[in-house]
Amino acid sequence: MKFSVSWLKQHLQTDASLDQITAALNTIGLEVEGVEDRGAALAPFRIAHVVEAVQHPNADRLRACKVDVGDGVIRSVVCGAPNARTGMKAVLGLPGAYVPGTGITLKVGEIRGVKSEGMMCSSRELGLGDDHEGIIDLPADAPVGQPYAAWAGLDDPVVEISITPNRGDALAIRGIARDLAAAGLGTLKPFAPEKVEGVYPSPLRWAVEDLEACPWVLGRAVRGVRNGPSPKWLQDRLVSIGLRPINALVDITNFFTYDLGRPLHVFDAQKVKGDTLFLRRGRAGESFVALNGKEVAVTPEDLVIADGEAVESLAGIMGGEHSGSDENTSEVFIECALFDPVRIALSGRRHDLRSDARARFERGIDPALLPAALDAATAMVIELCGGEPSTVTEGGAEPAWQRQASLRFERIAGLGGADVAPETAVGTLERLGFGVVARDAETVTVSVPSWRNDIASAGVLTQAPGLPAERAKAAAEGCAAVEPECDLLEEVLRIHGLDAIPPVSLPVASPVPLPALAPKQTRAVLARRVMASRGMLDCVSFGFLDSKVAARFGETPAALRLDNPIAADLDQMRPTPVASLLLAAARNAARGWPDVALSELGAAYRDITPEGQLAVAAGVRIGTTPRHWTAPARPVDAMDAKGDALAVLAALGVPMAALSVTTDAPDSCPMGFYHPGRAGVVRQGPKTVLATFGEIHPKLREELGLPGAAVAFEVFLDAIPEPKKRRKGAPELPAFQPLKRDFAFLVDETVPAENLLRAARGAERSLITEVVLFDRYAGDKLPEGKVSLAIEVMLQPRERSLTDAEIEAVGAKIVAAVSKATGATLRG
């Protein structure tokens, strides 16, 4: 919302400076977005009289001038403008003045041997336009010595404020003036336009077919008008806030839109077919060309104004070209209506039409202002365009907007935290237009003015669908009782000054701050960091992809198909983030980067239920391992992906001894994109699947254009159980030195090493703290089909040092347990 200070002072009697006005606006909740003050930059420039202008003695294109600025001193100024001449009035900048159009600061100089003590300026040099063919040529009656900005009306700052959705009244300059007056910055001037009596019957009448969308509408004609350019004062008003003057009739409606927040529309009465204007719903197939040149196809959900043949405007939003006023208009019909805010907002969004009228109607306008606004507009039409008015025609009736609200004085300090005396609070409300209905020592009851539709209004409370009826009713009644008082409290506090409310910290729930993240959120952050620490680049990709590609990674149910995708090849919710990462890896490989490692913490979609959206930490590696002097580069394999998955699980606190790896695919996790013989599933127990890993299927790798080896893994974060909360005690620090023993077993090559390790760990749980596989050997020195697995077992005595016999007994238990579980034999 923009307004000039001079326009504001048409409603506000005040001597306040610009800084005081902007400071007050901020403190009462009308936040200042910016101030444009052209006069401040032009303050040093004055109107000057060119006493003499002669040819420069040493330059063909320069003039040597003698200039008077009204201070009794004749100054020498060298000027290169072709229109510089004796006797003219111009704009002069003296030494020290900053020229906004060129960015230079003037100083006394000498040009070709002639002293120059200033600069006569063009429009472009003053930042007022693009004209630089010559210096500004002022009328002969321009007062010498007066500041040019003041004489030209450029010393009128324009203020822009932001308006919250509930403050429709602040979209009127009068509403802003009312707030500033209530804040003590002046006195609000009265607004009481004289009633305009009609001298002939209105040629048009209203027929309102949808009273819910338009409860009240007024209109009157003015005949014998002469439409043309509006006067300079009106054009200046509109130009100052960024509006383009069109003609007097249109400019009048734009003026009242900003001045009173009262949108109006004028029809050329002679272009309207028939004697009736209908306010009705749109009909299928109807359209009209709006004033912005856009053809609008109306719908049955839109409210339109139509004559006997066609739609003439989209009510409350934009008029049509057909019945618009032009230079040939001789009889005009002024529409002044009240529309339903919700209907206006929905229609505006539906047709993507933005207008000053829509901005005001969708926030709600003053329902009682219609007669006075129509009289004021009629009077201005007659004053500027001539003519005589008709009687007023009416449709519908003024709605019952009257309502009351009460405020308990103790709530000002108790809820608002401000020390405001009851007398001050009541005076504030009265200055804002509230009328005192009743008052006692504790409470005041006021009538709400018509222009404040945001206070004590019958709002809509959105409640949960499953809320019990009694509870929903109690909540609605409580809201209706509490909100009006809070509305009044807000008015008192903001006029008192939002900056005057003392800041108070919220109460501290506990001396130690509570965790900011839930355990699942913490695991997600940690998983992302672990993958990054292992050399993977973190990615953020779409949760959807091409349905044909998605089908290669899992099931693609129709329920997960997008009805309105952002692109034709992004129409299916992805079964796994691995798909997105492999596509990204393929794009990197196609651009010369075949060796990449990518990771993502994202969602995998199985079905439309909340349980069907899985949180997954996924990663892929393609190509070869990094080159290093200690080991040659090699193609990545399934063990690399397994290491990544286990590293994430270990960092998340999963007990590694409780995990097992199998090659069968779980029902809940599609693994068709993995190599069937080089992939695995990490489980905790027989049913809980924590992760999958493996090489990418060769056929899929070929389809995606991956030139080399490719592996992937998925860690299902939702499947990781919450850590058990145990009472923390002192850490166990055994006083006795641990010892290690090595064992080598001969076992069938089909037996997983994990089975052997698990059997060794369980042989003597009170002493064995760790079992590690450190060697695997297979060769011609072993029987066919056999491999040698060597393990290191750590024993930790707790009560006393172990004797040789006890150590040998533990070793025998380990050999027996491994032999029983795997059929292995101890190598000699």
Image: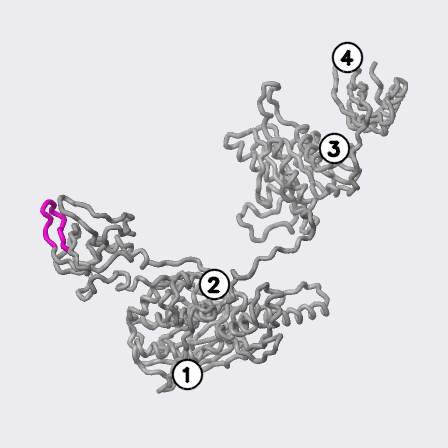
Q: Is residue 236 visible?
A: yes
Question: How many other residues sit within 10 Å of disc 4, few (<14), some (14-19) or many (≥20)?
Answer: few
Tell me how far mark 4 sits from mark 2, CA to CA. Answer: 90 Å
Q: Which residue is mark 4?
A: 781
- Give yes or no for contact between labels 4 and 3 (Cβ–Cβ under 8 Å): no
Q: CA distance from mark 1 to mark 4?
A: 114 Å
Q: Residue at label 2?
A: 30
Is 360 magenta? The answer is no
- Closest to the camera, between mark 1 and mark 4, is 1
Residue 725 image position (x, y, % from top left): 77, 43
Q: Confirm whether the magenta stretch covers residue 54.
A: yes
Going 57% across and 64% down the picture, which residue do you hit? 418
Q: Is residue 452 above or below residue 632?
A: below
Q: Secondary structure at mark 3?
A: loop
Q: Magenta region: which residues?
A: 53-66
User: Is there CB contact under 8 Å for labels 1 and 3?
Assistant: no
Q: Which residue is mark 1?
A: 392
Closer to us: mark 2 or mark 1? 2
Q: Is residue 91 above or below residue 537?
A: below
Relative to residue 579, is residue 315 drawn left or right? Answer: left
Q: Position of residue 218 (x, y in %)?
A: 44, 79
Helix, strand or loop under label 2: loop
Q: CA distance from mark 3 to mark 2?
A: 67 Å
> Which residue is most to the top?
781
